[in-house]
Amino acid sequence: MKLCPVILCGGTGTRLWPLSRRLYPKQFMDLGGHTLFGDTLKRIGVRPDLTPPLVICNKEQRFLAAAQMQEQGLDPTGRVILEPEGRNTAPAIAVAALAALEQNRGGDVLLLVLPSDHVIREDGAFARAVAQAAACAGQGRLVTFGIEPGGPETGYGYIQRGEALATGFAVRRFVEKPRRDAAEAMLAEGGYYWNSGMFLFRASLFLDELRHYASDMFHGAAAAWEGRAEERDFTWLGEAFAACPADSIDYAVMEKTPLAAVVPLDAGWNDLGSWNSVYDAASKDAAANVLVGDVLAEDVSGSYLHSSGRLVAALGVRDLVVVETGDAVLVTSKDRSQEVKNLVARLTRHGRPEKDTHLRVFRPWGWYETLALGERFQVKRIMVKSGASLSLQLHHQRAEHWVVVSGVGRITVGENLLELHADQSTYIPLGVRHRLANAGPQPLEIIEIQSGSYLGEDDIVRFEDTYGRC
């Protein structure tokens, strides 16, 4: 039976603000030349017993997911499923199960369900656990992976194992995030694992159990799949998905079914749920510090210091987390890093843009970065990938001036087609159709100066677009 990886890309990673934002969550963050989503793709690799992965995400992350799949040599066409609204893990997995069965022409398939934002240090141990779980699932079980606990952690749920099976163990019970004294008691008793949020089971069996224990959810997911639309690389679920009951797979199925089983996993797992866990998972210097980027530390110990661009200098501090980005700096003690989500909630209440986006915003054609913003003007740096182009568009409330920094730009301004090189420029009057394309083999970089009464990204009318955004 084929094994189909399902990668869940939901969630906003609010505890890892300011690097993680609503439109650029932690699974896509650059962690020094790699991302958690990219690492997950590498982990499953390309093997003859695996189908290409199915990726479940929302529309804002679709181009990020597709680009990183292409970087791994994976064709995203028909493999990226877009949720109109997040409904937690159980409906997302139901849709993936329906998709996998249809793509396998009705033949059953094993689903390996993986969050996109986990760290697993030992790929060999992970592969062995997957093989064990596949054998267990082949015997009619819904398998979860239990992490060998490293201490009385209160931020994770727990799984108590029951009787031994041919491979793995039956699940006796699930325990929600406990108090510390309860966690210490479970570890002293033994036979408990952290709940990893990773699963393996037959697609048809999961759907049968979902239909039995959460029929409204099953029918909502089925209606959303039936009402899907295919557009370029992506599959857009029908609007029925937004009305589907929202629940986790644990609550909807795993805590109710008698078929739940657990396979132990000891592979250097970490879910990076806080800056403290990022610190724990990273390599440290002689003073037990993790220093990322342009950092100067003097008489500092036990701290996580992260610079995204500007110099971060620290003197005489202990057990701190300091994270710098272009528009925000976080300072917190490590033992309170779980509470960063409270700061994000305050940003949300006050309508602050720092909760949603970085100064650098990624698009399917490349990215743009805000350099300066004032009354009636904005300056951006824009990078367009080789062979890519922006949409043919116009703005009603702003004019633009473009200066080529490097590369070759093919620029449409009204009826004129221009080819501009470094140090050349052009003017885009208000209300004139225009387009920017990279006409060379290297990245095209320009500086854009906007001026006008309104500079928001929603002042745009598209006439043609390579990426289906008209």
Image (cartoon, helix red, strand yellow):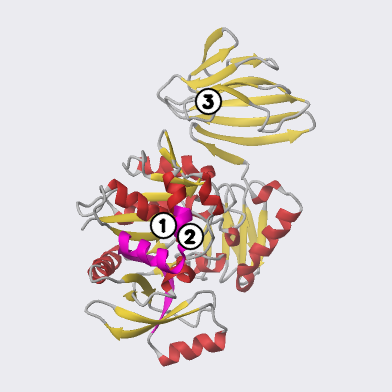
In contact (CB < 8 Å): disc 1 and disc 2: yes
Q: Cα distance, mark 1 to mark 2?
A: 9 Å
The residue at which mark 2 appears reads as: 217
Residue at x 46% of width, y 70% of height: 250
| Label 2, residues with CA under 10 Å away: few <14, some 14-19, many ≥20 | many
| Label 3, residues with CA under 10 Å away: few <14, some 14-19, many ≥20 | many
Residue at x 24% of width, y 66% of height: 131
Q: Amino acid at mark 2?
A: Met
Q: Cα distance, mark 3 to mark 2?
A: 39 Å
The residue at which mark 1 appears reads as: 94
* Side of 60 relative to 37 (left or right): right
The answer to whether any part of residue 34 appears in the image is: no
Q: Amino acid at mark 1?
A: Ala
- x then y, percent, for residue 140: 27, 70
| Label 1, residues with CA under 10 Å away: few <14, some 14-19, many ≥20 | many
Task: Say which label, 3 or 2, has the lower sequence index.
Answer: 2
The residue at which mark 3 appears reads as: 390
Task: Say which label, 3 or 1, has the lower sequence index.
Answer: 1
Question: Mark 3 against mark 1, which lies toward the viewer?
Answer: 1
In contact (CB < 8 Å): disc 3 and disc 2: no
Principal SS element in the magenta part?
helix
The boundaries of the magenta stretch are 192-221
Q: Is residue 414 magenta?
A: no
Name the element at disc 1.
Answer: helix
Q: Assign the N terminus to one quadrant of the image.
A: bottom left
Q: Assign the C terminus to one quadrant of the image.
A: top right
